[in-house]
Amino acid sequence: MTVRPRISLVLLLGAVAACGRSKSGLDGEDVPLVLPATCADDTDLPPADLVCTGLYANVDAKVTAPRVVPYAPAVPLWSDGAQKQRWINLPPGGVIDNSNPSEWVFPIGTKLWKEFSKEGRRIETRLWQKVHDNYWVDAAYVWNSDESAAALSAGGDMTLDDGSTYHVPTQDECQKCHRGRTEHILGFEQVLLGLPGATGLTLDELVQREQLSDPPPSTMFEIGDDGTGAAAPALAWLHVNCGTTCHNDNANSTGYAAGMLLRLDPTLLDGRPTDTFDQLRTTVGVTVNAPAWNGQTRIVAGAPDQSLLYQLISHRGTGMQMPPIATSIVDEDDVALVENWIAQMSPPASTASSGAQPETAVDAGM
Ligand code: HEC
């Protein structure tokens, strides 16, 4: 019997790891966030002032609270070149239920923040906070010009010091993207914390801290290839910019009816070939019958300029761009990765030899 010794070795290694990184062993990890005395007790409404969310222990010195942990997803959402910082606060002893690896369920009390800066100046800080089971509040806080405070905002356009316009999303706009997951959280998730490039509280760190209900067999993911040699970066970009938000199989997601599935499944990211992934199955050679783009093909293998998906991510203008909101500048560097990926795909044999239409499946929208 070789099984027993292996089990005890695993247990032993687990115990050693747990001693080194116990949940309560981290600085301030086992006490709740302390809010300034002037703040109302937690309510079902977001506080009026950012400091009352607990992010900063000293807002003047920009020192974050000890229990607020920074992280960055392996690939960020493109935000027109803004710099972003992100933090999470899990309640003491809080464990994330990742039994569905694509739909994490967070403990009540969880807070996440994302802060946007331009040219080194803080502009706005966004919050998602889980208040009850199935109930989250979200908010955007806009910083004053000397960055001494940030106040709750309903969203809208603001003018920056250099005269440029900056758009803070409205509540409705937040929902359009964040309804893509039942628990709303889009970037603190199994794929983006497990791919190379994630920093701070990564998937591996979460497992070591025993903060995941179902530790995955591996915490280091790899997106495989489809023969183009160019699939991995393109699929990662499409995952965070299109898939986590609108184009996935959560029936609440904004683009659900289109049936285009661009969110990666973390259980498939072990380097295996990507040919059969939903991202290819629902795009390559698939025509669209949404009124605006009737008859166009999402991805024409080998031809980015004939691929609707590429056209929309490389343009801006109402009805002519993807994502449709929250961006007015093309993500040139990353769009080039998608262009290259499509260009490297072999054209279907029928078009290559005879110029006939590729075989297509018809779907309900973009
Ligand atoms: C265009 C789609 C889009 C809009 C609009 C949007 N978000 Fe997000 N948001 C994302 C994506 C995608 C991520 C994860 C990637 C990242 O962090 O770069 C994210 C991340 C966040 C995070 C970090 C936690 C997480 O979900 O990963 C917070 C907090 C947040 N958004 C709050 C808001 C709030 C509040 C609004 C409205 C004021 C808003 N967002 C509007 C797409 C959007």
Image (cartoon, grey):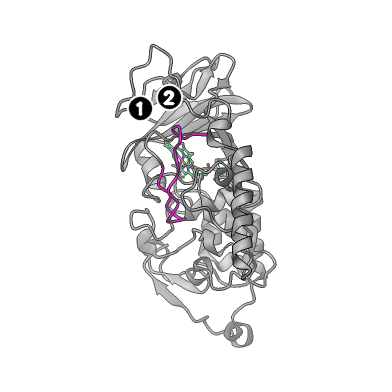
Position of residue 48 measured from the top left corner of the image (x, y, whole percent): 37, 21
- The stretch drawn in magenta includes residue 93: yes
- Number of dots carrying numbers: 2
> Which region shows up in magenta?
87-106
Q: Which one is in front, 174 or 9? A: 9
- The stretch drawn in magenta includes residue 38: no
Residue 85: mark = none
- Identify the element where label 2 is drawn: helix
Q: Which one is in front, 305 or 227? A: 227
Q: Bin the neighbour count of mark 2 within 10 Å (Cα to Cα): few under 14, some 14-19, many 20 and up.
A: many
Residue matched to label 2: 53
- Residue reaching furthest top? 38
- Amino acid type at circle 1 is Pro
Vertical comparison of 238 with 80: above or below: below
- Residue reaching furthest bottom? 354
- Residue reaching furthest front? 1
Q: Is residue 338 visible?
A: no
Q: Which one is in front, 162 or 222? A: 222
Vertical comparison of 84 with 141: above or below: below
Residue matched to label 1: 46
Q: Is ligand 1 closer than 8 angstroms to the Cβ of mark 2?
A: no
| Sequence order check, earlier mark of 1 and 2 | 1
- Amino acid type at circle 2 is Thr
Q: Choose top left, top right, bottom left or bottom right for residue 129.
A: top left
Position of residue 18 measured from the top left corner of the image (x, y, whole percent): 59, 42
